[in-house]
Image (cartoon, grey):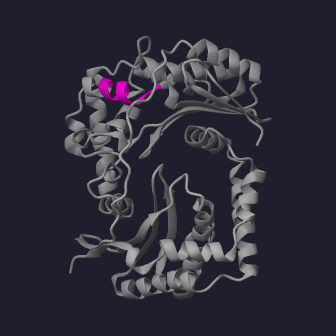
Amino acid sequence: MEYNLYSLKNGIRIIHKRTLSEVTHCGFVINTGSRDENIDKSGITHFIEHAFFKGTNKRKSHHILNRIDSVGGEINAYTTKENTSIYASFTNQHFERAIELLSDILFNSTFPKVELDKEKEVVIDEINSYLDSPYEQIYDDFEEMVFKDHPLGMNILGTEKTVKKLKQKDILTHISNNYQTDQIVFSIVGNIPLKKVEKLCEKYLAAIPEKKSIIKRNKFNTYQAKQTKITKEIYQTHCLIGSEAYSSFDPSKTGFILLNNILGGPAMNSRLNMGIREKYGYAYNIESSYTTFSDTGLFYIYFGTDQKHLGRCLSLVHKELKLLREKQISSAQLKKAKQQLIGQITLSEENNCNVMLGIGKSILLHNKVDSLLETYEKINAISQTQLQEIANNVFEANKLSSLIYTQKT
């Protein structure tokens, strides 16, 4: 991947990739998320993401929303456990409009009390919508169980109680403590010349006062397997099985991405989908996922099934995990798995908005972006022995946790 990377004097890093598209995507990726909160302020980072759109020193809320929408573009934001992103997509001629607006939102928001009070109701509705969806809620409850008494276990949205108590001073304090210039990346993917990028970043970002990070994250190192069943008023039984996995910096990460793809990745030919959904029809949706954090990772398998099929589904899932632990996949299977993952990664490069966010996060974590060729080389270097070793590490039976939502009888 050809890209340009440089830093402003205040520490903000700029990553730029030029494309031939008529559409440009740009945004800020900030190294702060829900794990950086105090428990009594749970949900504040996500709430700030909402509140960024509620007014600045020179704009009211409707001015912010109209600024990009009025030229056919889109503006959005999201919060994760470790990052906050604010970004926009637009036709190329509106790049200055976008960078000026995004910088105004991030660095000049005023968080007016009347707007905060209204937005609290919106966020509480969002929390309740997740509580209405067992498929969504079980992931949050599983993370809370696995990361018990650690900031990684806190719900990104917070709770109704913590959100209601948030005040303007809480927001300003949290921003002051967590939004440092050396932990901010501005990412651009589009047909914008580098000279124009440099000129406009200098104009809108260079004057931001330098502020270096001082807060250190508490590392997670207390994982213990747990098994929990919760009875709910639901029609379908939901199950999550998983364990601690590799961090963003662990050299085994790429191997586990490949192994997870074989087991239950997005393709219909994954082992879990073929062995449970297609063969028996026990589950409409069965998948495995792998999320990385700066100091740890989380692997999980999800499926929803009829209560009468729960035992059989659990048995089949554990059978697949045991098979990967005890038997190396064949060289032919490994070759096909590598081709599949490489194809998926290559196709994902067609989504320039995701590329923009991805390279921004990569710079934030590693201060570099692997080219596609480097990524392919890492995948092709994975051996059958390495995959089996990884399977025995992550899929070890006594390391697996489970959370099951069952029906009330």
Residue depicted at 30% across the width and 62% down the height: 145
Quadrant the N terminus occupies: top right
User: Is 406 within the magenta?
Assistant: no
User: Is 175 within the magenta?
Assistant: yes
Residue 74 appears in view: no
**Which residues are the magenta region?**
172-180
Q: Compare residues 68 and 361 and report the one nearer the observer.
A: 361
Expressed as whole percent of the image width and height from the top left, the position of residue 247 reads 50, 55
Q: Compare residues 337 and 313 and report the one nearer the observer.
A: 337
Report whether 63 appears left or right of 128: right
Q: Quadrant of residue 221?
A: bottom left
Expressed as whole percent of the image width and height from the top left, the position of residue 136 reads 38, 59
Residue depicted at 45% across the width and 67% down the height: 300
Residue 99 vs 57, above or below: the answer is: below
Expressed as whole percent of the image width and height from the top left, the position of residue 59 reads 44, 15
Residue depicted at 51% across the width and 68% down the height: 288
Q: Which secondary structure dominates the residues rendered in magenta?
A: helix
Residue depicted at 59% across the width and 23% down the height: 98
Residue 240 appears in view: yes
Expressed as whole percent of the image width and height from the top left, the position of residue 240 reads 39, 70
Report whether 236 appears left or right of 302: left
